[in-house]
């Protein structure tokens, strides 16, 4: 596959009320980061930056985490300034995680990201962490949690080891009702599979003999392998088609995608709808974007997608996607009308460049 000329860095917002386990989950991601360089922004409004001190055991408002990772304690008003620094080519980051204050309004951070003029970032989703053991009490003290859940793209129901099976079922039903179409993943100690949020990265250009030590290198072997025994269940579905998809049918699939389907990534061939381009697709929660990219010379023309979610029917998803291959040889007028549905979500390649 031909990479886009200027890849954008996904920015993930990690939210949740005080004590839900956000920092524990963040540290878990840093220790099991699948080769990614992660930039961390700690949105801590207190006079003492406790969260910044506890992220990966570092102390200070701005620290180097090794191997390109950065941690910044920042007020929301400074967010664009820090994102400009973190997206500089010299930082070589693959993903940025904003850990929101437990008292922050996460939808405001999301709004700032979507309104940002920074061409190097893209929205990577709002992850809401919920303390399963304390959820009823938290909801009573902070009824606004329902509003936070309603705008979340992914909900991590944490500390599930501290509740009974019946209690967990009740909490999950309440969270599910408030969260709408958001995927829900259960966890203990913030241990979710990093693949839900991070794409594995390999760097052939790095000299392993001289690279900096990472958290993975410093941890004991027993700690480094605990990701293989996670209890968080999610589904990953791969789909490949060697014939073009119908823009109309594929947009209908995206518009009706099931609750729990958190991420869709990959490339789509719309054939005669736009013979000169393939379309890079990025979907997280309700957010959807296409980026047209010119086909490379002699590049096989096919659709390749990966869909990630919780509680989704993999067989049904594949069947629906297979159905999108039907009727792709519609009349030119129909294809032109269908492409307007795609163009609603298109970011032009030039928009990704500085």
Image (cartoon, rainbow, N blue to C red):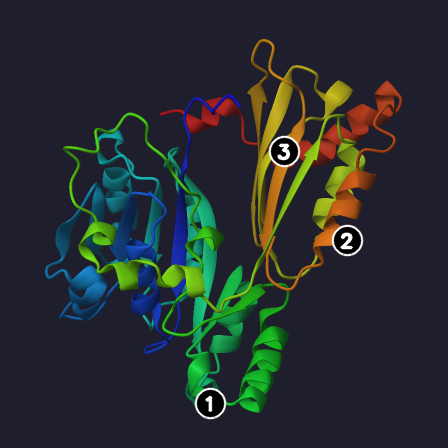
Q: Nearer the viewer, residue 89 or 321?
A: 321
Report crowding for label 2: few under 14, some 14 to 19, many 20 or more residues within 10 A (C-alpha).
few
> In the image, which is nearer the foreground, mark 1 or mark 3?
3
Q: Which mark is residue 304?
A: 3
Q: Which mark is residue 316?
A: 2
In percent of the image, x 29 and y 43: which residue is there? 37
Name the N-terminal-most of marks 1 and 2. 1
Q: Nearer the viewer, residue 353 or 130?
A: 130
Q: CA distance from mark 3 to mark 2?
A: 17 Å
Which quadrant holds residue 28?
A: bottom left
Q: Taking 194 as reference, is 320 left or right? A: right
Q: Which mark is residue 140?
A: 1
Image coords of residue 310 (percent x, y): 60, 62
Name the N-terminal-most of marks 1 and 3. 1
In the rendered structure, are the residues bearing label 3 and label 2 in contact, judged by CB atoms less than 8 Å apart? no
Residue 348 in sight from this viewpoint: yes
Image coords of residue 55 (percent x, y): 22, 62
Secondary structure state at the residue bearing disc 3 = strand
In the rendered structure, are the residues bearing label 1 and label 2 in contact, judged by CB atoms less than 8 Å apart? no
Q: Taking 95 as reference, is 276 left or right? A: right
């Amino acid at each position: 596959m031909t990479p886009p000329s200027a890849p954008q860095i996904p920015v993930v917002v990690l939210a949740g009320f005080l004590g839900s386990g956000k920092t524990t989950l963040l540290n878990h991601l840093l220790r099991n980061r699948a080769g990614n360089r992660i930039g961390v922004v700690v949105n801590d409004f207190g006079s003492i930056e406790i969260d910044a001190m506890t992220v990966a055991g570092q102390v200070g408002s701005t620290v180097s985490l090794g191997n390109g990772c950065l941690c910044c304690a920042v007020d929301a008003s400074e967010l664009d300034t820090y994102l400009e620094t973190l997206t500089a080519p010299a930082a070589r980051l693959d993903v940025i995680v904003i850990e929101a204050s437990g008292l922050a309004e996460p939808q405001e951070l999301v709004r700032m990201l979507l309104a940002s003029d920074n061409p190097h970032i893209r929205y990577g989703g709002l992850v809401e962490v919920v303390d399963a053991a304390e959820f009823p009490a938290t909801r009573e003290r902070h009824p606004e949690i329902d509003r936070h859940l309603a705008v979340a793209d992914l909900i991590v129901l944490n500390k599930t080891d501290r509740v009974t099976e019946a209690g967990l079922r009740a909490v999950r039903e309440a969270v599910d009702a408030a969260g709408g179409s958001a995927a829900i993943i259960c966890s203990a100690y913030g241990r979710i599979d990093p693949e839900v949020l991070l794409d594995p990265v390999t760097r052939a250009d790095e000299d392993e003999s001289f690279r900096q030590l990472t958290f993975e290198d410093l941890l004991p072997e027993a700690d480094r392998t605990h990701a293989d025994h996670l209890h968080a269940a999610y589904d990953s579905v791969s789909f490949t088609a060697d014939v073009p998809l119908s823009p109309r049918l594929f947009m209908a699939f995206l518009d009706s995608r099931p609750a729990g389907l958190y991420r869709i990534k990959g490339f789509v061939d719309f054939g005669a709808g736009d013979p000169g381009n393939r379309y890079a697709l990025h979907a997280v929660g309700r957010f959807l974007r296409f980026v047209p990219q010119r086909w490379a010379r002699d590049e096989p023309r096919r659709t390749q997608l990966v869909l990630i979610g919780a509680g989704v029917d993999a067989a049904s998803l594949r069947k629906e996607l297979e159905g999108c291959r039907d009727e792709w040889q519609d009349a030119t007028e129909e294809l032109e009308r269908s492409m307007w549905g795609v163009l609603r979500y298109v970011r032009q390649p030039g928009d990704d460049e500085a």
